[in-house]
Amino acid sequence: MDTLTRPAIAFVNPSVGFSDRRKSKPIGLAYIMAYLEKAGFPSSGFDFGDSEDDAVELAALYGLDRFDVVGFSVYNESFRAAVAMAEWIRSRRPQCLIVLGGPHATAVHEHILRRHPCVDVVVRREGEEAMLELVSCLDDRAKLTAIRGTTWRAPSSGSGSGSDGDGGGGGLLVNEDRDFVPDLDQIPFPDAEFVSHSGYPDLTYYDEVQGRLKAALTICSSRSCPYDCSFCGVLTIGRKYRSREAERVVAELLHFRERHGVDYEHVYFSDANFFVSPTRALEVAEALYEADPQVTFSFGTRVNQILKAADVLPRLKERGLRFIELGIESASEPVLERLAKHVKPEVNVAAVRLLKRLGIEISLDFIMLDPATTLADIRANMEFLRETGFYDYVPHDHLYSALVLYEGTPIRDFYARRFGVVFDPDELPSPFTLFEVPEVQRFSDTLRAFRKQWQDRIDGALARGELALASIGDDGLSPGRASHARLQLDVVSLRHAPNLLTERLLADAEAGFPLLDAGGLEALLPRLGHDRVPLHDLIERTGAVAREAGFAQAPGAVGPHGRD
């Protein structure tokens, strides 16, 4: 096919609604775009991931109706936005091939094609090879609709080439699954550019060991995870774990240093589970260190793997490991069983204590509530957070978290059976409306009210206070004003405030909510600081000290270890 006749291709990351998390480009789409580019099929990328604008208005603003092929990567949260855009494109350009992929599309591929005529095809699981075949044979319907790993709407029932044995799946062509890409090192680096509606802040990491802010890069060094946690969307795509060679990971870092002209010195590994093979993890760390001893890194994994590979962790720390995103999820044994974590609460405690003993920081993955949560489960969680030192941990998102029932996960099926309902495949049920225990529902509602009213104010004061602490000496600011020690205590109190409120609310729930009934949320607010002042006064006092130190405004939102 001549270059001039190549199809115009777009890939779209639809909106999931407002997010205050740091944005980075959608790496899954970036890999597909790079793969197609290498084969001679350039494409355009559009990332609306955290836009609150109307989906159709975005589609019109960015001219999505000018393309021959538009592919959407969809999650439960973004599905409605994707369909709205697809319907608008279909009305404007009927001949456009509209493709859906991603975890949600894979989980309910048949449903999507039956309910939504604006969608032509679903690419299941991984997308690189199937998308290349799609754009390569657009003019050959017979080849197009027979591509492995795709599901189509059949021209008529019974005419399908499906592999499900029903002659097309009731009007669908459900082609056999495509094998996973066996060698990830053959896929080009995800060097694709996106038009982003809100832009991408510079990704950074503050290295407390070296005492400086570093430019950071996200790298995915493996795919999938061999475990079967019941709530994890990775199960939708498949559990076949594959990893890249250490040399290719280093090559990607060096590639993007040159490509962007940025001296990236921290790597956030975005793998679903980086630590599946501790030996391989150490090889990557050694290769990064050999390339540049200043490079540090972080990754996510499970608690049981931490304990199994305890002997490797000191070496990883020597080679630049700064923190581990740890999938603790819960301190309640019944909840851990529902989540299919296959660990006991004491394993969580042992993993945390090991990392703290080694001086490796922890980024906390936690699910405070799920639909069957009891007050006893919450009590176990709060005791765990206190006993393992997470009262000083920020951000406080873990206190407000609730289990999300993603389509295609076993836990969603579990609760559908438990509730005797059929969840609409197009919808993601609100996790804050499904609690079985009335006291837990009221606990959650009150805690969310506290978050809405107070958390942003706490975050702002905390950020300004910590900046002020870093800038003033032990002698304080000026005669008669706050000392360094007092400000330090106030900052610690702000860190503890949401935890203390949660504990007071839990105790009130266990007693039947007498305080909440008598005085509302205000009756539960803790008094804090060295002089036990109300929360409002502590926030105002910390802000005043920060202003005197020259920090009138809070910095941009920064999550744990320099991330959001």
Image (tube, grey):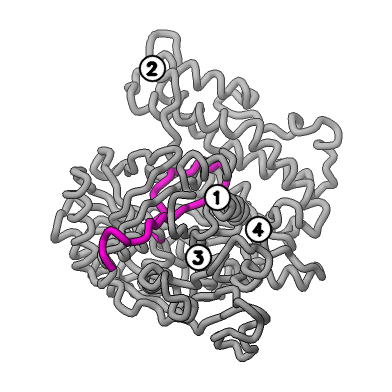
Q: Residue furthest top?
A: 479
Q: Which residue is mark 3?
A: 101
x, y percentage for residue 445? Answer: 74, 44
Mark 2 or mark 3: which comes first in sequence? Answer: 3
Cα separation, mark 3 vs mark 1, equals 22 Å
Cα separation, mark 1 vs mark 2, equals 57 Å
| Label 1 packing within 10 angstroms: few (<14), some (14-19), many (20+) | some
Q: Is residue 7 magenta?
A: yes
Quick one: 65 or 451, which is closer to the camera? 65
Stretch of the chain drawn in magenta: 1-28
* Mark 3 or mark 1, whichever is nearer to me: 1
Question: What's the amino acid at mark 1?
Answer: Arg
| Label 3 packing within 10 angstroms: few (<14), some (14-19), many (20+) | many
Question: What's the amino acid at mark 3?
Answer: Gly
x, y percentage for residue 232? Answer: 55, 67
Mark 4 or mark 1: which comes first in sequence? Answer: 1
Helix, strand or loop under label 2: loop
Q: Are marks 4 and 3 in contact (CB under 8 Å)?
A: no
Q: Which residue is mark 1?
A: 92
Q: Which mark is residue 549?
A: 2
Question: What's the amino acid at mark 2?
Answer: Ala
Quick one: 180 or 217, which is closer to the camera? 180
Question: What's the amino acid at mark 4?
Answer: Ala
Quick one: 162 or 342, which is closer to the camera? 162
* Mark 4 or mark 3, whichever is nearer to me: 3
